[in-house]
Amino acid sequence: MVEISASILSMKNENAIQTLYNLETSGIDYFHIDVMDGKFVSNNTTNNMLEYCEYLNSISNLPLDIHLMVEDVKNYISSFLVFEPNIITVHFEAAKNKQELLEWINYIKQNNCRAGISIKPNTDIKQIIPYLPFIHLVLVMTVEPGQGGQKLLQSTIKKIEELHKYITENNIEVDIEADGGINENNVNQIKGAGVNIIVAGTSITSSKNFKEAVTKLK
C-alpha cells in the first residue's frame, strides 16, 4: 500500500487549524509542505508554510515532508530544520553544480533529517542517477511546480517507470514520491509505475470526506 503525503498548498488559511486536524485524522502518513519563494516558481508560500509548520509542531505527531521550491536553498533548509521534519527535498534544478547539490544533501543529513531530490517534468531521470546512493527519496513532479490543482502530465509516468527500474536493478534503497494532479482516477497508474509515496492536495482537501478520499487513494 502506498503512503499519502497530504499537500496543504491549497488549504484555506481561515480554516487552517480545523483542516489540519481533519487531515491528521484521515489516515494520511505525512504533511507535505510546499515551500515557494516567488523566484524559483512564481508563487510565494514561505510565510504561510512557516506558520503551518508551527501549528503542526504543536498539534500533530505526523512527520513533515518539506518540499523546497526556492533559490536560496541553504537558508531555507536552515529555516525548516527547526521543525524537525522527517525529510527535506531540494530541487535538482536549483543547484549550480554537483558540488552545491551534494553540500545541501549533506547539510540536511548532518541535521538528523532525511534528504531528497526533486525534478521538474522536463528534467531527464538520468541527471539524478549519480545522486541516488546519497539520498533517501526522489520526488518526481508530475506537473510544473508552483501551483496546486493542475492536471497530471502523462509524460512523467515513463520517467517514474525508468527510475523504478534502475533502482530495482541496482538494489538501491530510495523512495519514489510523485506530486501533482494525482487523484482517484489516475492513482493506480501512478502506483503501477513504481511510486510508494503519493502527494495529494486538492483531491483530498476539496472532498467532503477526507478519510474516504485518503482510503480511495490508498
Image: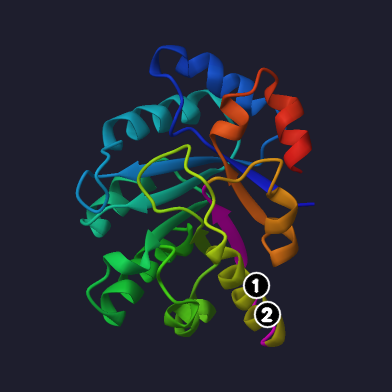
Q: Estimate how packed mark 2 is, as few (under 14), some (14 to 19) or many (20 or more) residues with alpha carbons within 10 Å.
A: some
Q: Real-space Cα distance between discs 2 and 1?
A: 6 Å
Instruction: Specify whether 102 is left or right of 128.
Output: left
Quarter of the image with the C terminus in it? top right
* Amino acid type at image mark 2: Lys
Dots 2 and 1: beta carbons under 8 Å?
A: yes
Provide the residue designation for mark 2: 165
Q: Position of residue 110 (x, y in %)?
A: 41, 65
| Residue interval drawn in magenta | 170-180
Residue nearest the observer in this picture, 206 or 196: 206
| Quadrant position of residue 24 | top right
Instruction: Specify whether 200 is left or right of 192.
Output: left
Q: Residue at x 51, y 45 (%)?
A: 151
Q: Residue at x 27, y 53 (%)?
A: 70
Provide the residue designation for mark 1: 161
Residue nearest the observer in this picture, 158 or 201: 158
Q: Residue at x 35, y 27 (%)?
A: 51
Q: Position of residue 65 (x, y in %)?
A: 51, 47
